[in-house]
Image (cartoon, rainbow, N blue to C red):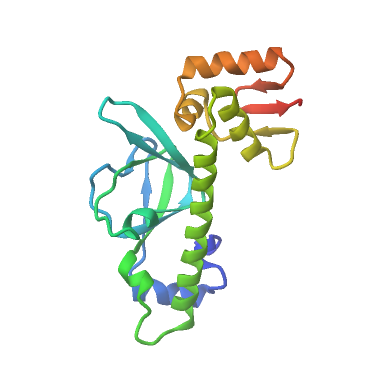
Amino acid sequence: MLDVDLFERINNDGVLELLKCIGIKTKVFRKNAYILKNSAKIDYLGVILGGSAVIQKTDTLGNITIVERLKVNDIFGHNIVCCGLDKSPVDIIAENECEVLFLPFEKVITPCEKLCHYHLQLIKNVMKMISKRNSLLNDKIDIIAQKTTRDKILALLETFRNGEKVFSIPYSREEMAKFLCVDRSAMSRELCKMRDEGILRFNKNHFELLK
């Protein structure tokens, strides 16, 4: 548990103190289990300790859009509770066996009577994690704001390449299309065109940008 950003600069004794002070709990979810359901009450922050999960939103027609993927160290729930909402507008589903740590939001942001160093450091860590997640969401807005499917694909690949020529993305074809908010068949055709034009090579979720 100590190997996550949430407990950065907090030692074992500090974590034990926080367990008592705040009431931190963990739970393991099986593959495809709902960690959080749409319209469910939420008054906590969640942190992925192991495995991965996906945040998705379903519209009135049943169309599913992937909002983002959560991996170890990622935080969720902050954008909901910080806005004063008490019900979730999204589903969060475990992609594999997933361990999640839950923190009561009000207890996290309210320093204890002792104003202990551990709690103050926890608040700093949570704010840092929230800032990081918001930055990633801003990246997604930039990606899906692109006008064409090709431009969306290239913007997504640039986000994950990290300066490398050969790299992988954490999405299957179906998940990639949902993330980009485009038709899967149209996206696949565009990828094939880009391959034939010598712009990129790909094999499943592995890519190489050539231009």
Q: Is residue 137 left or right of residue 110?
A: right
Residue at 45% x, 19% y is: 183
Residue 45: quadrant of the picture: bottom left
Q: Quadrant of the C terminus?
A: top right
Residue drawn 55% across and 68% down? 8
Identify the residue at the far front of this view: 147
Point out residue 138 in the picture as x, y percentages from the top left corner.
51, 47
* Residue 185 to residue 33: above or below: above
Q: Nearer the viewer, residue 137 or 35?
A: 137
Q: Is residue 205 above or below residue 86?
A: above
Q: Is residue 73 visible?
A: no
Give the quarter of the image for residue 113: bottom left
| Nearer to the camera, 49 or 60 | 60
Q: Is residue 127 visible from the viewing direction of this image?
A: yes
- Expressed as whole percent of the image width and height from the top left, the position of residue 60 reads 25, 29
Q: Is residue 107 left or right of residue 174?
A: left
| Residue visible at 53% across and 31% down in the picture | 171
Residue 80 drawn above or below residue 198: below
* Residue 107 found in image quarter: bottom left
Q: Measuring from the top left, give residue 152's x and y in whole percent.
A: 56, 29
At x 70% / y 21%, what residue is drawn?
201
Instruction: Say whether residue 79 is left or right of residue 171.
Output: left
Q: Nearer the viewer, residue 165 or 34?
A: 165
Q: Position of residue 175 (x, y in %)?
A: 47, 29
Picture mark count: 0
